[in-house]
Amino acid sequence: MVKNINLPLSQLGLTARGGADPMIRGVAVDSREVGRGFLFAALPGVHAHGADYVQQVLEAGAAAVLTDQKGAEIAGEAVVDAGAALVVAEDPRQALAGAAALWFGAQPPVIAAVTGTNGKTSVATFLRQIWTELGYEAVNLGTTGVEGAWSHPLAHTTPEPVTLHSALAAAAEAGVTHVAMEASSHGLDQRRLDAVQLVAAGFTNFTQDHLDYHETFDAYFAAKAGLFRRVLPEEAVAVINMNDPRGTEMRAIAAARGQEILAVGRGLGDLSLVGVRVDASGQDIRFNWHDRPFQARLNLIGGFQAENVLVAAGLAIASGEDPERVFETLPHLGTVRGRMELAATRDNGATVFVDYAHTPDAVATAIKALRPHVMGRLVAIVGAGGDRDRTKRPLMGQAAHEHADVVIVTDDNPRSEDPAAIRAEVKGGAPDAVEVGDRAEAILRGVDLLGPGDALLICGKGHETGQIVGDDVLPFDDVEQASMAVAALDGKLV
Ligand SMILES: CC(=O)N[C@H]1[C@@H](OP(=O)(O)OP(=O)(O)OC[C@H]2O[C@@H](n3ccc(=O)[nH]c3=O)[C@H](O)[C@@H]2O)O[C@H](CO)[C@@H](O)[C@@H]1O[C@H](C)C(=O)N[C@@H](C)C(=O)N[C@H](CCC(=O)O)C(=O)O
Ligand SMILES: Nc1ncnc2c1ncn2[C@@H]1O[C@H](COP(=O)(O)OP(=O)(O)OP(=O)(O)O)[C@@H](O)[C@H]1O
Ligand SMILES: N[C@H](CCC[C@H](N)C(=O)O)C(=O)O
Ligand SMILES: [Mg+2]
C-alpha cells in the first residue's frame, strides 16, 4: 500500500538489526504487492512462511523486511546481503499492527469494537445506525465491508492491519468520525486490530465456531478475551452481555484491567431488558437504564436482535452519548441485510426469511426467534460451509431438527470439499431432513411446501451474493432466489 509521505523505518516503531533506518515507501504483507522501498512483513502462516517469498520482494526493491526468529533463519542472510534492513520481532504481527497504524496515521476519533461468536455484524450495524441518527458521520466495518457514510468492500471480517489502517485512514479523510468495527477471533488471534484506538468494546456471546482454526474452546475464548485483555485501553468501557454463560468471565477480565463495565442483559445489568411484546413486523421492548424505565418500538424480527440492539445502545452510551438520546433513535433502526430479512411473501400470506445463521447456536436461535411470528409450520433450510469447522455440521443439523417442523439440507459454500459429504455430516444431526444439493432447488422446494400461516427460514448465507464451489464464486443470492421461487410458484412474472 503506497502513500504520499514516506517515513523512516524508525518512525514506524521498528528497529533494524545493525541500526539501518531506510526510508519506507509502502507496507505489504503479500510479496506480490511489494514495490521499491517497501517494508515487507514476512509472517508465519498456515500454508507457508512469508520469508519463503523474500527473494521476490528483494528483486522488487524492498527496503526492509519485518519477520520473526524463524523468518530470520529462513531469509535473514539474503535480506542483509541485498542491503535491505532486517527487523526481527518476537511478535511480528503485533509489530506490523503498530507499524501500519503509524504508516497510515489518521484514525477516526471514536472507534468501538465488538466480539462474540454471533451478532458482531448486527451490533456494529445498529451502532452505526444509532450514531448516524445522532448526526455523526459513521460507518460499520466488518463482514459486510465498510458501510455507512463511506463505503468500501472488504474480504475479511477483521482485515489484516495494512488493509484495516488504510480503510480507517481513508474513512477519516472522507470525514468519518465514528467507526463500529467487528473483532473476529482470527483477527484478534493474529493481532490484526491491536493498534486501533478504541473507546469501547462489546461482547455478545460465546458458542461453537471456528474450531478448525482455534482447535479448543479455551483457545477460541482466549482469542476473544484478547479484545479486553490486550486491545481495549484501561480507561475505556467494556459492554458485556451478561446473559451469556461466559459473560461473567469476560466481565472479570475487563474489570481486572480497570475498564469501566457497562453490563447488559435480560432482567439484569445497567441496561436491562425487562419486557418484550412480539408482533408480525417487529417487537416492543421495555428496558431499564439503571432504575429508570424506558420503552421502544423495534422494527426488527427476533428476540436476539433486541439483545444486539441493547449491546449497540450500550456501546453508544460508552462512547459518550446521552442515554436518553440514544434510546430515542431505537425505533429508527432498520433490518441488517441478510439477518432475519423478510425476503418474500406468498399470495397465501406465508413468509420467507433469510438469515446468516451458520453456527449451531445461531440456527437454534434464529428458528426459535421466528417461531412467535409464525402461526403454522416452520420450514428451515440449512447447510454448512466447506473448509471450515467440521464438528459444527451435525450440531447445526440437530439444531434445525429440534426446532423446525420440516428441515431441508442443502449446500452452502462447499469450497474445496465434496458437497455430498458435507450434507451427509449435517444430516447426521437431522436424520429426517430432505436432502436437496442444489440450493436454488432447495429454496423452490421449501417455498412450495408453504401453506397459509407457514414460514420458511433460509439459513447460512444471509447477505452473501455467491456460492463458493472449488475456486469459483457462482452468483447466488438467497433473497433473490426466494422472490424468484415465490413468483414462479404463485404464477407471476419476475
Ligand atoms: C486462517 C487465516 O486467517 N489465514 C490468513 C493468513 O493466511 P495463512 O496464514 O494461511 O497464509 P499463508 O498462505 O500460509 O502465507 C503466509 C504468509 O505468506 C504470505 N504470502 C503468501 C503467498 C505469496 O505468494 N506471497 C506471500 O507473501 C501471505 O500473505 C502470508 O502473510 O494470512 C493471510 C494474509 O493475511 C490471510 O489472507 C489468511 O486469511 C484467509 C484467506 C482466511 O480465509 N481467513 C479467514 C478464515 C478469516 O480470517 N476469517 C475471519 C473470521 C470470519 C468470521 O467469523 O466472521 C475474518 O476476520 O474474516
Ligand atoms: N445475539 C445473538 N445470539 C445468538 N445468535 C445470534 C445473535 N445475533 C445474531 N445471531 C445469529 O447469528 C447470525 C449472524 O449474525 P451476525 O452476522 O450479526 O454475526 P457475526 O458475529 O457478525 O457473524 P460472523 O462471524 O460471520 O462475522 C444471525 O443471522 C443470527 O442467526
Ligand atoms: N465468517 C464465517 C462465515 C460463514 C458463512 C457460511 N455461509 C459459510 O460459508 O460457512 C466464516 O468464514 O466461517
Ligand atoms: Mg460478521
Image: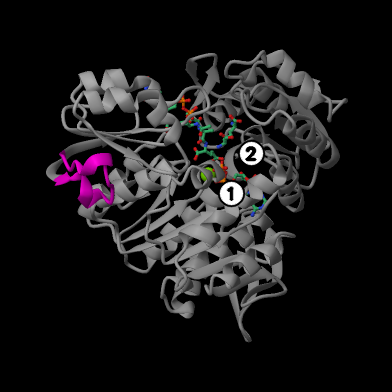
Q: Secondary structure at mark 2?
A: helix
The answer to whether 276 is drawn above or below residue 345 in the figure is below
Q: Is residue 1 visible?
A: no
Q: Is residue 135 left or right of residue 283?
A: left
Q: Quadrant of residue 459?
A: top right
Residue linked to disc 2: 214
Residue linked to disc 1: 223
The first of marks 2 and 1 along the sequence is: 2
Q: Which residues are magenta?
A: 7-23
Q: Secondary structure at mark 1?
A: helix
Q: Is residue 327 magenta?
A: no
Residue type at mark 1 is Ala
Q: Is residue 484 left or right of residue 102?
A: right
The residue lying at 35 percent from left, 20 percent from top is 53
The answer to whether 237 is drawn above or below residue 231 in the figure is below
Q: Is residue 376 visible?
A: yes
Label 2 within 8 A of ligand 1 by Cβ: no
The answer to whether 486 is drawn above or below residue 180 in the figure is above
Residue type at mark 2 is His
Residue 441, position as x, y percentages in the image: 66, 18
Residue 254, position as x, y percentages in the image: 58, 67
Q: Is residue 8 magenta?
A: yes
- Tag 2–tag 1 contact (CB < 8 Å): yes
